[in-house]
Amino acid sequence: MVAHDNCMSDLLEWARDNQGLLARHHVIATGATGRLLAGELALPVELLRRGPLGGDLQIG
């Protein structure tokens, strides 16, 4: 999962609404997004590196 800083609250809202679905999957997210998701949902999240040379490039 990836969210631009300006869209983070929208992603968190979606994730809360779909927490049951996400719990059945292996969730992978960029660093900042993943830390927020893990903290908000208490679900395991595999964190990729953060920053312009991190998670976005790893996903790509």
Image (cartoon, rainbow, N blue to C red):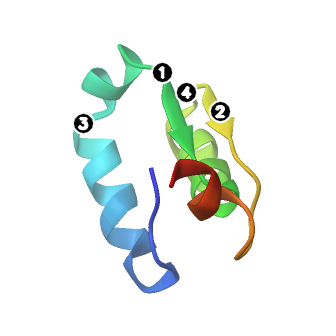
Which comes before the other along the chain, label 1 or label 3?
3
Task: Provide the residue designation for mark 3.
Answer: 18
Q: Which of marks 1 and 3 is in front?
A: 1
Residue 7 appears left or right of 29: left
Which comes before the other along the chain, label 3 or label 2?
3
Residue nearest the viewer, comparing 42 with 52: 52
Q: How far apart are marks 2 and 1 (CA)?
A: 8 Å
Q: On screen, 44 above or below 9?
A: above
Task: Provide the residue designation for mark 2.
Answer: 46
Q: How far apart are marks 3 and 2 (CA)?
A: 18 Å
Which comes before the other along the chain, label 2 or label 1?
1
Q: How far apart are marks 2 and 4 (CA)?
A: 10 Å
Q: Distance between the residues labelled 1 and 3?
A: 14 Å
At a point 33% along the width and 46% down the height, the residue shown is 15
Residue 38 appears left or right of 18: right
Which comes before the other along the chain, label 4 or label 3?
3
Q: Position of residue 46 (x, y in %)?
A: 65, 32
